[in-house]
Image (tube, helix red, strand yellow):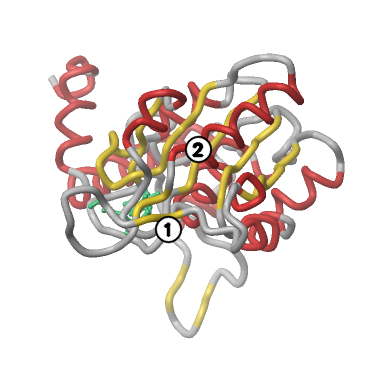
Amino acid sequence: MNFHVMTLFPDMITDGLNTSITGRAIKAGIMSVTAHDIRDYSDDKHLKVDDYPYGGGAGMVMRAGPVCDCYEDIVKCIGSRPRVVYMTPQGYTFTQSMAEEFAKEENLVILCGHYEGIDERALENIVTDYVSIGDYVLTGGELPAMVVIDTVSRLVPGVLSNEESAQTESFSDGLLEYPQYTRPADYKGKTVPEVLLSGHHANIEKWRHEKALERTKKYRPDMYEEYVSKHPEEFT
Ligand code: SAM
């Protein structure tokens, strides 16, 4: 899978993603992340890409021209018009199921805004998906883009090793994940639940499912209600 990030701060993207699991996948050629500097498409002699907002008001707005020209260059390079995800606090909140949908794309463009955002006409021209990472405002779209890329990349075949499997994690079955423990079995007097040491797989699965339900009910009552309505047989 190929991610193309349109940004004013390409180093943020490459520095952030060329390490750990994403870095390993990039090196192995399983995925690529190319940061495209929108500033390279400025027609201004000082490479300015922003201007004052029409109608007045605080801050600056990224101009439509450099953003659209940057996208058209990506289109020319890859020979198709890929989906464009604009990171914005005004978008739909990012979810695991959105990540699953994005993971099906061969090429995904992610557009990062800065300042007060981007001229609406550029968005109308090229954006297919408006995505927020939560109800708060960051200074730019680079951290949100990295959140999306990290999440999507874990679903790309070959990115995670067997030990890092995404199969049984929180959200994969509509519940938060059960608590995890590793050695030692006794840490300063706090012991690992007996059942996990028993080797009895059916009992371990049952315990984990109960704990997942307990956690989801406590921390995400909305998810719990949805789970109960989809699995009524478990609760009769
Ligand atoms: N004026 C904009 C508004 O009120 O909706 C906020 C602009 S914000 C300071 C600058 C950029 O950061 C945005 O264009 C967007 O790309 C990114 N951004 C900020 N918060 C975000 C969030 N919660 N999710 C995704 N992107 C965000």
Q: Is mark 1 within 8 Å of ligand 1?
A: yes
Q: Which image quadrant is residue 56 in? A: bottom left
Spatial CA span between label 2 and label 1:
19 Å
**Dot 1 surroundings within 10 Å: few (below 14), some, or many (20 or more)?**
some
User: Relative to the observer, which residue lies in front, 168 or 204?
Assistant: 168
Residue 156, position as x, y percentages in the image: 66, 30
Q: Which image quadrant is residue 105 in? A: top right
Q: Which residue is label 1 attached to?
A: 140
Q: Which residue is label 2 attached to?
A: 65
Query: Which residue is at a point 52% across and 25% down the rendered structure image?
Result: 102
User: Relative to the observer, which residue lies in front, 92 or 59?
Assistant: 59
**Dot 2 surroundings within 10 Å: few (below 14), some, or many (20 or more)?**
some
Seen in the picture, residue 159 relative to 229 is either above or below; the reply is: below
Query: Which residue is at a point 42% across and 33% down the rendered structure image?
Result: 96
Q: Are marks 2 and 1 in contact (CB under 8 Å)?
A: no
Residue 113, position as x, y percentages in the image: 43, 50
Residue 22, position as x, y percentages in the image: 70, 48
Residue 116, position as x, y percentages in the image: 31, 55
User: Relative to the observer, which residue lies in front, 81 or 107?
Assistant: 81
Q: Amino acid at mark 2?
A: Gly
Q: Residue furthest front?
A: 45
